[in-house]
Amino acid sequence: MIQPMASPSNDSTATVSEFLLICFPNFQSWQHWLSLPLSLLFLQPMGANTTLLITIQLEALLYQPLYYLLSLLSLLDIVLCFTIIPKALAIFWFDLRLISFPACFFQMFIMNSFLPMESCMFMVMAICHPHLCVFIVVKNALLTAPIPILTSLLHYCGKNVIENCICANLLSCDNFTLNRIYQFVAGWTLLGLDFILIFLSYTFILRAVLRFKAGGVAVKALSTCGSHFILILFFSTILLVLVLINVARKKVPMDILILLNVLHHLIPPALNPIVYGVRTKEIKQGIQKLLQRGR
């Protein structure tokens, strides 16, 4: 979760109306080179998730609850990528570091709302109850909406430099203990509960799969479930590492934290359409039909 930091006592008390983003402060001369892999990593998830959305929309056979879930997951990935990465690329390419106060908190709202929502999507797909989508939206809205609202009510003064590619670690002159406690409780309530339910669901699935007498069916099921669980574990591990690094901020180089922040918004969106989409026979056939229409 994104949280403010206390402003040094010797800073000016002038009110801050905009922030200056400093991506990878120790590698400023490398920014143009860093933009190349970042651009490719941005285009891949955007293209893959857009293709998946179009395929599900155009293929009548995919009008099923499971594929509606995949559509929602792809939409979440697109919004997350589009909210974070273009600004980072604008910094690398054109040195456009300034971000307004409203734009910064809008970015925080998207991150704090959509990342837990993506975790909930993994949980819903694991327990196979698509009708819980409405519950996901309501639960995340109620629990995560107060985070950027509480943060925006704080008084920001003095230093307006954010050593990150995204709006994080804002310098506040106010006491933000309430914000920190709420973010901690809300974050672990959402993500912790989701991961427990996901783990239990895959445990039951594994027990059921091992009862199959047909070896080929069991192997296929294990392969599918295994790839899904590895992706979920990857998503959760990066998030856990980010939390731990934020706790031990002074012991970890800031560039490492920034890199993990960026990758966390790129790698899962890049892998989701491959693991959940392209590996599915019906979606693979739908993509082939889509490509044939384009000829």
Image: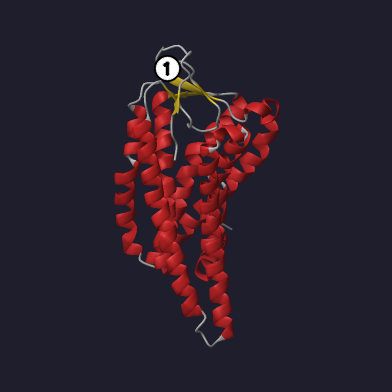
Q: Tell me the quadrant of the picture where the C terminus can be found.
A: bottom right
* Percent x, y of residue 131: 31, 63
Image position of 92 with respect to 240: above or below: above
Name the residue beneath numbered marker 1: 157
Please name whichever residue, 201 or 189, is drawn nearer the observer in this view of the structure.
189
Image position of 116 with respect to 95: above or below: below
Please name whichever residue, 258 or 184, is drawn nearer the observer in this view of the structure.
184
* Percent x, y of residue 35: 65, 35
Name the residue: 55% across, 48% down.
Answer: 238
Q: How is the image coloured?
A: secondary structure
* Percent x, y of residue 125: 42, 63
| Left-right relation of 107 to 143 | right
Q: Among all residues in the image, which is located at the extreme bottom?
A: 213
Q: Secondary structure at mark 1?
A: loop
Q: Is residue 85 visible?
A: yes
Image position of 44 with respect to 125: above or below: above
Name the residue: 52% across, 54% down.
Answer: 51
Total marks shown come to 1
Q: Residues within 10 Å of mark 1 (few under 14, many from 20)?
A: many
Q: Is residue 273 visible?
A: no
Q: Amino acid at mark 1?
A: Cys
* Percent x, y of residue 194: 41, 57
Name the residue: 54% across, 81% down.
Answer: 217
| Left-right relation of 123 to 93 | left
Q: Tell me the quadrant of the picture where the N terminus can be found.
A: top left
Please name whichever residue, 84 or 238, is drawn nearer the observer in this view of the structure.
238
